[in-house]
Image (cartoon, rainbow, N blue to C red):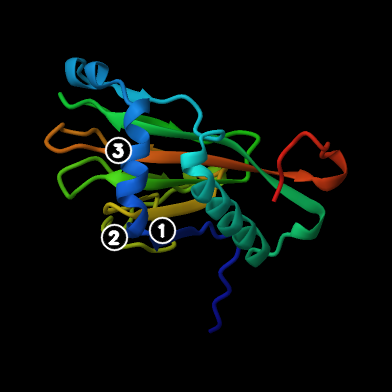
Amino acid sequence: MQELNIFTSAIYSLEKKEWLNHLNNSCEKYIDQDYITNNFGVSHHSFSLINDNNFKEFNLFICKIAIGILNTQGYNTDIYSLIISEVWVQEFSKKGGGHHNSHIHPNNHISGFYFLKCSDKTSFPIFHDPRYIKKALQLTVRNSNDITLASEKIYKKVQPGTFLFFNSYLDHEFAIDEGKEPFRFIHFNLQAVPKQLITNDIKRI
């Protein structure tokens, strides 16, 4: 019997450890250390990093990877320009309790993370099956630790220097952090816009 997997959702992972020192140092001014030190359960969100020249190479890189992903997935990328809609750094509370509930990023097409500080003792991303009809009819899985066609969600362990890219419709969250070690990452969203709608004052790839 032949198996045809259709309507799948991919998560793309790659390592870029050589950027860790530069990007961690560049992010320091965006982190409110008093806020994350003195408050339980918070996730600190910075201002936008789009116009900071320290992140220029980073921003060009994520555009290149994202347009390649969309092209590989079968989309006609010739008629779209890819715009970075959001880039920001986050760090969870040093007192623990930092987390994100399940969510998506509307009006975007590729989202992702670059992990700056993390370990096997920190939070991690969790991805949920986006097929709402399947959720309504979900059966009990045999082994929740296995990644199969029956999986409801995926726990993705990461390390410093890990990039994750995924389609923005994919529900994701972050597990509750215990505050044992620092947890910091850059989050980004990109939007594919028809080229005929792009004006000269918008940067494009």
**Is residue 12 positioned above or below 88 on the image?**
below
Q: Is 155 left or right of 164, judged from the image as shown?
A: left
User: Amino acid under label 1?
Assistant: Ala
Contact (Cβ within 8 Å) of mark 2 with mark 1: yes
Report which residue position mark 3 lands on: 184
Q: Quadrant of residue 28?
A: top left
> What residue is drawn where x is 41% and y is 58%?
150
- Residue annotated with mark 1: 150
Name the residue: 30% across, 31% down: 91
Q: Locate residue 198, reporting x and y percent.
A: 82, 39
Find numbered disc 3 in the image and state the secondary structure of the residue it sits on: strand
Q: Amino acid at mark 3?
A: Arg
Q: Earlier in the sequence, mark 3 or mark 1?
A: 1
- Where is residue 172 shown, x and y percent of the image? 43, 41
**Local secondary structure at mark 1:** loop
- Taking the image as drawn, is residue 89 in sight? yes
- Residue most toward the bottom? 1
Q: Image check: 87 left or right of 97?
A: right
In percent of the image, x 71 and y 45: which residue is there?
204
Where residue 179 sits in the image (x, y, percent)? 15, 31
Point out the tag, 3 or 2, that comes first from the N-terminus. 2
Q: Residue furthest right?
A: 196
Q: Quadrant of residue 92?
A: top left
Return the residue at label 2.
Answer: 142
Which kind of residue does numbered mark 2 sit on? Answer: Arg
Which secondary structure lies at badge 2?
loop
Compared to 76, does 204 lie above or below? above
Task: Name the residue at 51% across, 59% down.
Answer: 10
